[in-house]
Image (cartoon, grey):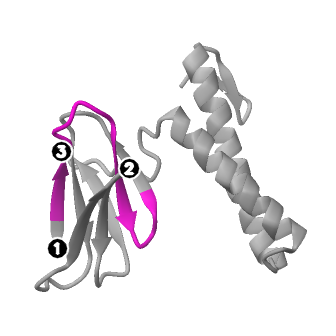
Amino acid sequence: MPKTSVDNDTENLLCLWLEPWGTDHWMRPGEQFTVVTEGEPEESPFDVVVHDQGISVWVNTADAAEVFDRDGNEVLCGHQRPIEAVRQFLAGAETLLHHVEGGSVGGSATHQEMARSHYERLRQELAEAEAAREGESHETDGVGSVL
């Protein structure tokens, strides 16, 4: 089971991108995440790239990978995602939705539904993040919660 660890030794929030899936996992200063795959060990199971948007860990041969924190807890996509990133992702999702529904990229009904669903998930995430930032209670599934 190949694995590699990534440490955030900066004083800033840092994004760990897991590729080729494009999932984002945000690391606070001092945090360490470990990427684990189910593939067979090989000479180079990962490539690590540092860039302006964070660090990308490319999984070279496995069909899946997971990210864990120091305590062994799974770190899901969007973990600790800052509200500014949610706003940027939402703007991109809105543009995609416009193109898919407008037919400029030839979106099938399936693609249109996927784009709508992605847009709505991000819109909900932004609403929850804004409510949390303001310290307000946000209703989800009929149950009040404060993030």
State the count of labels. 3
Label 2 SS: strand
Provide the residue designation for mark 2: 25
Q: Residue at x 42, y 44 (%)?
A: 79
Q: Is residue 32 magenta?
A: no
Q: CA distance from mark 2 to mark 1?
A: 19 Å
**Closer-to-camera residue (54/27):** 54
What label does residue 78 carry, if any? none
Residue at the location (18% across, 45% down)?
70
Q: Residue at x 18, y 35 (%)?
A: 30
Q: Which residues are magenta?
A: 4-23
Amino acid residing under circle 3: Arg
**Residue position marked by numbered label 1 in the rendering:** 2
Q: What is the spatial separation of the Cα atoms under label 3 and label 1, in whole angstroms?
A: 17 Å
Q: Nearer the viewer, mark 2 or mark 3?
A: 2
| Marks 2, 1: nearer the viewer | 2
Q: Judge the density around disc 3: few (<14), some (14-19), many (≥20) Cα neighbours within 10 Å.
A: few
